[in-house]
Amino acid sequence: MDAIAAEKAALDFITNELARQNTMWGPASERVDVTKGELFQAGVGQLDAVFDRRNGDDSAFAEAPMIYPEGWSGFRSYGADFPNIGVGITFLIQEMKRLAMNGEDLTRLSRTADQPYNPETGLPNPISA
């Protein structure tokens, strides 16, 4: 699979997972577990388990990481790293949606003069279509 098709596969997965989560909870859930930022915790927890598995912990999904919401059931692996990362990212997108709906500033700040870029650390590889 080339880079463009892989990017499309990732975005398609996330779009489908957002639809699945919206079906479960509603597109703008006001449940207490959602409004307290637990989607953020679930996303980071899912990614934490992927990180642990990638670093040799074969039991990374045997129990929920400490950051995973305490009252949530069903922590599990969704298969390979691709779907697990996708589910984690989708939880984080749900949290971003909640923050945006609550009026959080959406501005991405640029690098300032006291945060120079160091080209010696490497430039991103350009991907040509």
Image: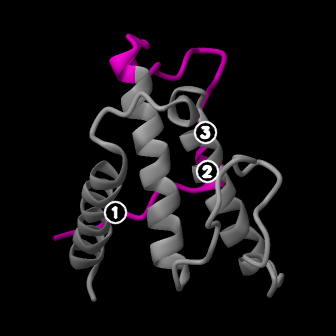
Q: Main secondary structure of the magenta part?
A: loop
Which amino acid lies under the numbered mark 1 shown in the image of this protein?
Pro
Q: Is residue 4 magenta?
A: no
Instruction: State left or right for residue 3 relative to residue 119.
Output: left
Decide: few, some or many residues near mark 1? Use Cα within 10 Å; few <14, some 14-19, many ≥20: few
The residue labelled by disc 2 is 42
Q: Residue 24: x and y, percent?
A: 35, 54
Q: Compare marks 1 and 2 and give the one earlier in the sequence.
A: 2
Which residue is pictured at 79% across the width and 59% down the height? 65
User: Relative to 113, does residue 50 appear above or below in the rendering?
Assistant: below
Which amino acid lies under the numbered mark 2 shown in the image of this protein?
Ala
Q: Compare marks 1 and 3 and give the one earlier in the sequence.
A: 3
The residue labelled by disc 1 is 126
User: Relative to 13, does residue 121 appear above or below in the rendering?
Assistant: above
Q: Are marks 1 and 3 in contact (CB under 8 Å)?
A: no
Q: For mark 2, give the secondary structure.
A: helix
The residue labelled by disc 3 is 38
Q: Nearer the viewer, mark 1 or mark 3?
A: 3
Q: For mark 1, give the secondary structure.
A: loop
**Residues in magenta?**
100-129
Which residue is pictured at 41% across the width and 43% down the height? 93
Which residue is pictured at 61% across the width and 50% down the height? 42
Decide: few, some or many residues near mark 2? Use Cα within 10 Å; few <14, some 14-19, many ≥20: many
Q: Nearer the viewer, mark 1 or mark 2?
A: 2
Decide: few, some or many residues near mark 3? Use Cα within 10 Å; few <14, some 14-19, many ≥20: many
Q: Residue 41: x and y, percent?
A: 65, 44
Instruction: State left or right for residue 87 relative to residue 75.
Output: left
Where residue 29 sits, quadrant-wise, is top left
Q: For mark 3, give the secondary structure.
A: helix
Total numbered labels: 3
